[in-house]
């Protein structure tokens, strides 16, 4: 059983209040997910984020494969962080922490994701070929999309 980790970091030239307003609205996940994933929220995105919130999605991580993904928002500290955990979905385990902090001229966001792929040894074998590159592509897309929406942080 192998636990993988992904760290991302991005600075944006927005206020902490503006960033939190965007990221605490689950419907905005549609905006920052690559179109080729055919991401669609089925339920749970009608309210601002709160602990215990269940959000149900439909995604297509690879052409011709459609999956349901159910996450729970387990912890929320307004303007500081939130945590989403997979309850059912494509990963064997998914724990995603989102951190926000004010910096000169904007905010810094950090994501820390711990995850396990399904299918045991076979899943681990294909992790560097399929799962890891796909996850990296999603966060690269997200970084570019956020810069389009909010501008590029100077520096």
Image (spheres, rainbow, N blue to C red):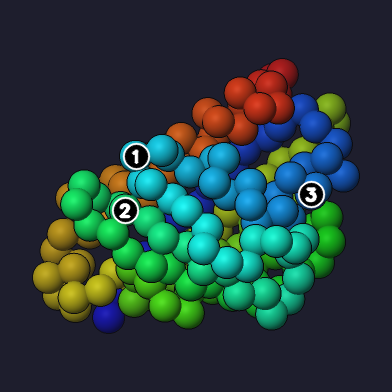
Image quarter of residue 1: bottom left
Is residue 79 shown to the viewer in this render?
A: yes
Disc 1 + disc 2, Cβ < 8 Å: yes
Q: Which mark is residue 124?
A: none
State which tag comes first along the sequence, 1 or 2.
1
Q: Quadrant of residue 116?
A: bottom left
Cα distance in 3D space between marks 1 and 2: 8 Å
Residue tagged by mark 1?
36
Q: Which badge, 3 or 1, comes first in the chain's sequence?
A: 3
> How packed is label 2: few (under 14 Cα within 10 Å), some, or many (20 or more)?
some
Residue under label 3: 20
Q: Is residue 115 left or right of 95 when viewed as pictured?
A: left
Q: Mark 2 points at which residue?
A: 60
Q: Nearer the viewer, residue 88 or 108?
A: 88
SS category of the residue bearing label 2: strand
Q: Name the residue located 68 percent from the left edge and 34 percent from the top edge.
A: 11
Residue displayed at 14% across by 64% down? 125
Instruction: Point out the frontmost of discs 3 and 1.
Output: 1
Q: Where is residue 61 in the image (x, y as percent from the top left)?
A: 30, 52
Q: Measuring from the top left, give residue 147's x and y in whole percent.
A: 62, 26
């Amino acid at each position: 059983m192998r636990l993988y980790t992904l760290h991302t970091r991005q600075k944006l030239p927005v206020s902490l209040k503006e960033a939190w307003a965007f990221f605490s609205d689950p419907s905005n996940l549609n905006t920052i997910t690559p179109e080729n994933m055919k991401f669609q929220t089925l339920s749970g995105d009608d309210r601002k984020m709160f602990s215990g919130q269940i959000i149900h999605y439909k995604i297509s991580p690879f052409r011709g494969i459609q999956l349901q993904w159910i996450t729970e928002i387990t912890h929320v500290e307004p303007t500081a962080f939130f945590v989403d955990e997979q309850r059912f979905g494509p990963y064997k385990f998914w724990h995603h922490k989102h951190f926000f902090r004010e910096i000169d001229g904007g905010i810094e966001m950090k994501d820390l994701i711990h995850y396990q792929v399904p299918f045991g040894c076979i899943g681990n074998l294909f992790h560097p070929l399929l799962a890891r590159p796909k996850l990296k592509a999603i966060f690269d897309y997200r970084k570019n999309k956020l810069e389009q929406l909010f501008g590029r942080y100077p520096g």
